[in-house]
Amino acid sequence: MFEPAQRRDMYAVVGCSDCGALWILADPTEAKTAQCPRCRTRHETRRLERFYRTEDRDAAREARAAMVAEKSGDSEAFDALPSVREMERRLDDAGVDDDEYLTAAGLDADAVADAGDVGGSPSQSRPELVRAALSEGGARTESEIVAYATERGVPAEAARDVLERLTRRGELTESGGEYRLL
C-alpha cells in the first residue's frame, strides 16, 4: 500500500466521512471547502483526512485507485494490472484512429475535418471544451464553465453532465464552488 507523505503537496487523496468516497483534491490548502463527488456533502478541507499526498497527479490517481481496489476487496486484481499511466497509453494505442474509422464508414476524413473546422480551429469534444474553459481561465465556477461551453454549441445540461463526470473521474476538482483541472 502507499505510504502517506509528511509534507504539504499539490495533490491529496481525501475521503468523505459520510459516504466513504475517495477523491483527489488539487492543492487541498487553497480552498476552504470541497464537495464529495458522490454524495455532494460539503466538507471543510482542513478537516478532510489526507490518505495520500504527492506532487504528481498520476501518483495520486494510482494511490486512489489502489485504495478503492483495497476497499472493495480487489487488491490482488489491482496489483495484476499495469499502472494507470500505462493503461492510458495502451488505450491511446488501441483501436483505429478517426481517419481510419471514417474511411471504413465510407466518408472522406478530410471533408469531415473541414466541416468540423469553426473559425479556423478544429472542433472539440464536449469534455475538451470543459477542460479548455478551465485551462484558459484557471479556477472557474460551474456557471462560467457552462457559459463557455454553451457559447461553443454545447447544451447547458450536457456541459453540467460533462463537468460532473470529469469531477467523478478525478480529472477536475471542485472546492469552494470553483473547479480546477488536476
Image (cartoon, rainbow, N blue to C red):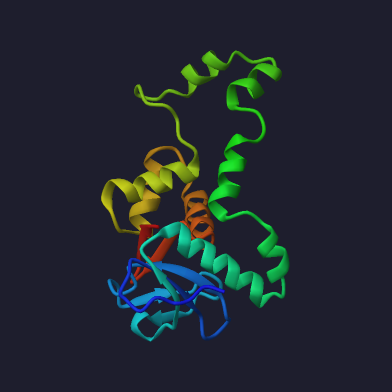
Quarter occupied by residue 6 = bottom left
The answer to whether 136 appears left or right of 60 in the picture is left
Q: Position of residue 113 (x, y in %)?
A: 50, 20
Q: Position of residue 160 (x, y in %)?
A: 48, 55
The answer to whether 78 appears left or right of 47 in the picture is right
Q: Height in image: 41 above or below 140?
A: below
Q: Height in image: 126 above or below 7?
A: above
- What residue lies at 52% left-to-right and 67% top-to-bottom? 63
- What residue lies at 67% left-to-right and 33% top-to-bottom? 95
Q: Give the camera-side residue of 165 and 158.
A: 165
- What residue lies at 65% left-to-right and 70% top-to-bottom? 69
Q: Give the camera-side residue of 75 and 138.
A: 75
The answer to whether 59 appears left or right of 67 in the picture is left
Instruction: Count how many numbered circles sit on residues in the image.
Output: 0
Quarter occupied by residue 75 = bottom right
Q: Height in image: 110 above or below 133?
A: above
Q: Quadrant of the C terminus?
A: bottom left
- What residue lies at 33% left-to-right and 54% top-to-bottom? 144
Q: Position of residue 166 (x, y in %)?
A: 50, 56
Q: Give the camera-side residue of 175 and 30.
A: 30
Q: Quadrant of the N terminus?
A: bottom right
Q: Position of residue 141 (x, y in %)?
A: 33, 60
